[in-house]
Structure formats: structure tokens, C-alpha cells
Image (cartoon, grey):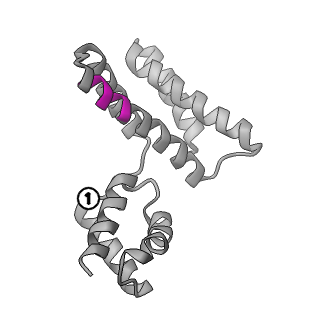
Amino acid sequence: MSLLKQLTTDMVTAMKNRDKDTLKVVRMLKAAVQNEKIELGHDLSENEEIAVMSREYKQRKESLAEFEKAGREDLVDQTKKELAVVEKYLPQQLSAEDVKKVVKETIAALGADSMKNFGQVMGAVMPKLKGKADGKLINQTVKEQLSNK
């Protein structure tokens, strides 16, 4: 089932259950997917759908950090609920150990031996982990592994 159909189904379910919080988030996600579809001018591939969901997740994650820093507990709780809904549409996230393993394999395959190869390693790792791990975690892991060389 495509993401757009899944969002529509979940939206109807949320309406029937009178779950306003979930409904609001699902509507925003559906709008984001439809806007991306219109902008690109074609039906979205699975990778493009994951990219949209990742962007939405990242925006909420950044908002959460800002709200926590500002001491806005009301918005922190709301944003955490939104994050939980968005996570349902993302692929299973890899653990830090799994990311480290993929990064080590890629570094070995490329023969990278210093921070000079950072861009090359990131370019090879990102397509493998796109949507499966946070970009900051990947970035940190690559830097860590290359600095140990």
C-alpha cells in the first residue's frame, strides 16, 4: 500500500475514533506528501516518501529541542505525541551499533584512511542508510571512525 493510501486510511480511522491529535498530524503528513507530489510532478517513489517523512520527523525533533530549551512543557508533550505518530510511517531505525558496522564496512571498501575522505565516505554511506538512521548519527559515526585511522 502506498504511503498516501495508508495516510488516508489512518485519517479515516482517526476521524471515526475522534482522535483529534492523531488526525491533525496525519493530515499534516498527507499534505506534505501531496505537496511533494505536486512539486515533483509525478507519483512519489518509496525513497521520496521516506525522505518526506524523515523531513517531517526532523522538523519535529528540532522543535522538541527548542521547546525543551525554552521550558514550554505544554508544547513538549504535544510534540512528543506528534513524533510518535510520524515514527509509525518511517522504516525501522537502525541502532548506533548497526550504523557503526555499515560505516566500518564502507570505509574498508573505499580504503578511506583519513578525514580527507570524509565526503567520499558520507556519499557512499548515506544512500545505504537513508531514512533508516538519523543523519547526525551517521555524520558523527563517520567522523569518529575516520579520526581513529
Give coordinates of residue 94: x percent, y percent. Answer: 31, 58
* Apparent side of residue 99 relative to residue 91 in the rendered image (left or right): left
Give the residue at x 53% y 48%. 51
Range covered by the magenta-colored residues? 62-68
- The residue beneath circle 1 is 95
Give coordinates of residue 1: x percent, y percent. Answer: 56, 45
* Apparent side of residue 110 relative to residue 148 in the rendered image (left or right): right
Give the residue at x 52% y 30%. 29
Give coordinates of residue 117: x percent, y percent. Answer: 44, 77
Give the residue at x 22% y 17%. 73
Q: Residue 65: within the magenta?
A: yes
Where residue 148 sits, quadrant-wise, is: bottom left
Task: Indicate the quadrant containing the C terminus: top left, top right, bottom left or bottom right.
Answer: bottom left
**Mostly what secondary structure, the magenta segment?**
helix
Q: Is residue 14 above or below residue 126?
A: above
Is residue 110 visible to us here? Answer: yes
